[in-house]
Image (cartoon, rainbow, N blue to C red):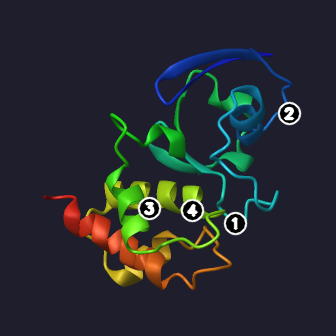
Amino acid sequence: MQVTITVNGTRYTRDVDPRMLLVHFLRDEIGLTGTNIGCDTSQCGACTVHMDGKSLKSCTCLAVQANGREITTIEGLKSNGELHPMQQAFWEKHGLQCGFCTPGMIMASVALLKDNPHPTEEQIRHGLEGNLCRCTGYQNIVAAVQSAAENSGK
């Protein structure tokens, strides 16, 4: 099947197997490897992207379901060579260690702040429940999201 998907502002048209997952389209068809494949069971959230502005685990969506849609990946958050405020906050607050879960955590966090610009710690933890980290213990991730929320109005 042929699909046309806009990813980070660029339209891509490809012939794909109807069973191809969006995560494989992003990584294998157009070469955006920031979206990670962590568990193959939709449990870890490492593959989180935005589809039409909403957070989505790209291993739960077929590429054909994304036909005609707007996808934003971790690579699409940068603007004019500058890190997105959430990326900067993760850097400054040490919200990463090995970095494998980081793209998904950042994408989920950006969506969280879009829906709730000033979340409590409990709301942040609840909002990130679908994203797993095996390294950090989450405290610095929560601190990064809090920092990004505090700095978003400046």
Chain-order first, disc 2 or disc 4: 2
The C terminus lies in quadrant: bottom left
Residue drawn at 37 percent across, 78 percent down: 143
Q: Which residue is mark 3?
A: 109
Q: Is residue 70 above or below residue 2?
A: below
Crowding around mark 1 (Cα neighbors within 10 Å: few <14, some 14 to 19, many 20+) is many
Cβ–Cβ below 8 Å for labels 4 and 1? no
Q: Residue at label 1?
A: 44
Amino acid bearing label 4: Thr
**Looking at the image, how many numbered discs can be counted on the residues?**
4
The three-letter code of the residue at mark 2 reads Arg
x then y, percent, for residue 146: 32, 73
Q: Label 1 vs label 2: CA separation? A: 21 Å
Kind of residue at disc 3: Ser
Q: Name the front one of labels 2 and 4.
A: 4
Q: Nearer the viewer, mark 4 or mark 1?
A: 4
Residue 89 rendering spot, x and y as whole percentages? 36, 65
Question: Which mark lies nearer to you, 2 or 3?
Answer: 3
Q: Amino acid at mark 1?
A: Cys
Residue at screen point 36% across, 82% down: 121
